[in-house]
Image (cartoon, rainbow, N blue to C red):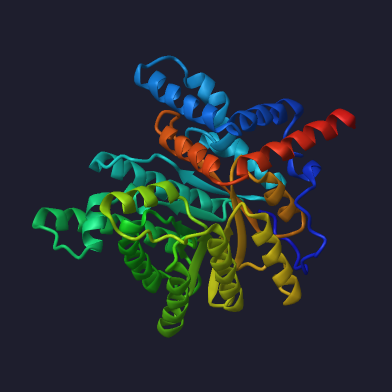
Amino acid sequence: MTKKSSTIPSTSLSFEDTKIAFASKDNFQLKKSYWIFATMNQNWLVNLGTFFIKLFLFLHFPIKKIIKSTIFAQFCGGETIDGCESTIQELEKAKIGTILDYSVEGEESEKSFQKTKEEILKTIRKSAENPAIPFAVFKVTGIFKAELLEKAQTEVELNEEEQELFDHSKEILVEICELAHQLKVRLFIDAEESWIQTTIDHLTYEMMERFNHETAIIYNTFQMYRHDMLANLKAAVETAQEKNYYLGVKLVRGAYLEKERQKAHEDEYSEPLHVSKEDTDRDYDLGVELCLKNVERVHFCMGTHNEASCLRLCDAMNALEIPSNHPNIYFAQLLGMSDNISYNLAASGYNVAKYVPYGPVDAVMPYLFRRAEENSSIAGQTSREFALLQKEVNRRNNA
């Protein structure tokens, strides 16, 4: 990405400028996005569409071309890293970085673990050679069996075969982190469900202690919809200070709301989540404040589609006279969503990146189904996207 001059953020930043937000879309692309979000704005249509897509894929109906030209094109960069090149270049024109995310989910064979490892290593190498790709990312369940992560978290002793599998996966984790360290590529380790997250945390902090002594290479993800997460973040900052390494932090609100509630209900334990969204928002913003206060020690990325939280950070940076392009502070949103945030932030000189999922169409369908369900469960998110697209369609029609 083109290096920007140090500038103090402007307090006049607005996320209502749809001309900037959708400048990269021609009229056809804009209207296609408009109709996709018009459909997603109806929960019953999302549920019905998801059901029939699953059914048609199961029955091997020839619908992949339709999927690829609609929902896949909206939320994914391509089927391969090379297939994402046009997306990477398009984002770079707007001074927005790309985070390549191999989004194949739910496969737990040794063959799939090796495939995931190779893809992650490719994304790290790609990032090292292209400054428009500021981070790499992966999920620990892409290389570990979830069952073993959960068993380790409950401190149940693994049998000999399980321990060998766990140790083998850990070797893969070390190999991935070593390459990121060697090539100086920042690496996000994504958050997952609470019943495996503590194990993921322990593995991630072990990697930080090993590889984050010169700068933040390994980043952990904090889901602030958990009521214990602000305390966990504070403890992580203190530990990094004590052990003298840099803490990499990605702050999100949380992506597994329905699964967390269902599991807590089925297993009869207290939900680890905040009771209200207001509590989540409060802890999220307090987490951002904590990171900003320790910005020389804590390198952080604010992964959010929440406009108020983004503006709050921009205002805080302005008040502290922190340059908008401070290298330790990033904003990130998902491809195909919240372009009004991403493009307007980038236009004002902030460091911004888009998560760009990729993978074979049929293999990333679980990701796309989850994305549709999450959008439906986030109050007002899809309606907001639809309203902004409608506003830009009207603006162009009247121009």
Q: Quadrant of residue 20?
A: top right
Q: Position of residue 267 (x, y in %)?
A: 26, 53
* Relative to 146, residue 214 above or below: below
Give the quadrant of residue 295: bottom right
The residue at 50%/43% (across/down) is: 374
Above or below, 358 relative to 277: above
321 sits to left or right of 151: right
Q: Is residue 24 visible?
A: no
Q: Residue at x 54, y 27 (%)?
A: 45
Residue 214 showing in the rendered view? yes
The residue positioned farthest toward the right in the image shown = 399
Residue under the image location 56 percent in, 75 percent down: 290
The front one of 197 and 335 is 197
In this view of the protein, which residue sits in the foreground, 201 or 91? 201
Up-down relation of residue 154 to residue 23 (above or below): below
Q: Residue furthest top?
A: 61
> Can you give x and y, in whole percent of width and height, for residue 234 in the image?
47, 76
How many numbered marks are there?
A: 0
Toward the left, the furthest residue is 160
Instruction: Return the residue found at the far bottom.
Output: 242
Where residue 353 sits: x, y (%)? Answer: 61, 52
Residue depicted at 73% across the width and 61% down the height: 4
Q: Quadrant of the image for the C terminus? A: top right
- In x, y percent, where is residue 232? 42, 72
